[in-house]
Amino acid sequence: MEAILADTEKYKIVSPDFVSNHFLRIDNSLARLYQEGSSSELEMDYMEVKSPQVGRFFVIPKTPKKPTAPPLRHIVASGKTKTEFISALLDFFLNPLVQDSQFYLQDSWVFLDEIFRCPGQCTLVTLDVVALLPQHSSP
């Protein structure tokens, strides 16, 4: 784990003040949404986290890629973080919209059913996102 976190191209140590400043920025953004009438009092209460924590970092192996020496998938768990309930509320509102899309697949089993119903000759294409927003940094 230390070797992963030592990669300064991807990770950096931040101060508690940095974290507090970002918590404050989130609070200010939510307050602005409420003041503009874009969020209700009930939604604000739901999104409030009284004692937020920073995300917990861990890794899991990508075993199908190389079973003997698998690369690691980096995960940040967001439980009890400042954004946990913001994400849940967004999911609540966006999920019905996504499900109405012609490209929505409920799960892997539905995907397999669709593949087997493919008429004639089909070409399957897959994508693997290696580094989403690799150059992203906070201001």
Image (cartoon, rainbow, N blue to C red):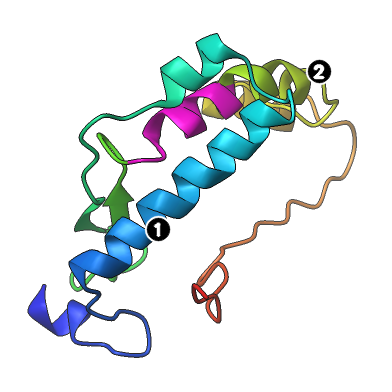
Q: Is residue 37 above or below residue 25?
A: above
Q: Residue at x 55, y 36 (%)?
A: 30
Could you tell me residue 37's position as x and y percent?
Answer: 73, 23
> Quick one: label 2, few (<14), some, or many (20+) residues within 10 Å?
few
| Percent position of residue 113, x then y | 66, 22
Q: CA distance from mark 1 to mark 2?
A: 35 Å
Q: Secondary structure at mark 2?
A: loop
85 and 39: which is toward the camera:
39
Neighbor class of circle 1 (other Cα within 10 Å; few <14, some 14-19, many 20+) is some
Q: Amino acid at mark 2?
A: Asp
Pick the front one: 20 or 88: 20
Give the residue type at disc 1. Answer: His
Tell us which disc is closer to us: 1 or 2.
1
Residue 19 in view here: yes
Where residue 34 appears, x then y in whole percent?
63, 27
SS type, badge 1: helix
Give whichever of 24, 88 is nearer the camera. 24
Query: Mark 2 highlights which residue?
Result: 100
**Given the current orientation, which residue lies at the most extreme left position?**
2
Q: Is residue 118 left or right of residue 63?
A: right
- What's drawn in magenta, residue-wise? 82-91
In percent of the image, x 46 and y 42: which residue is there?
Answer: 27
Q: Where is mark 1, residue-wise?
A: 22
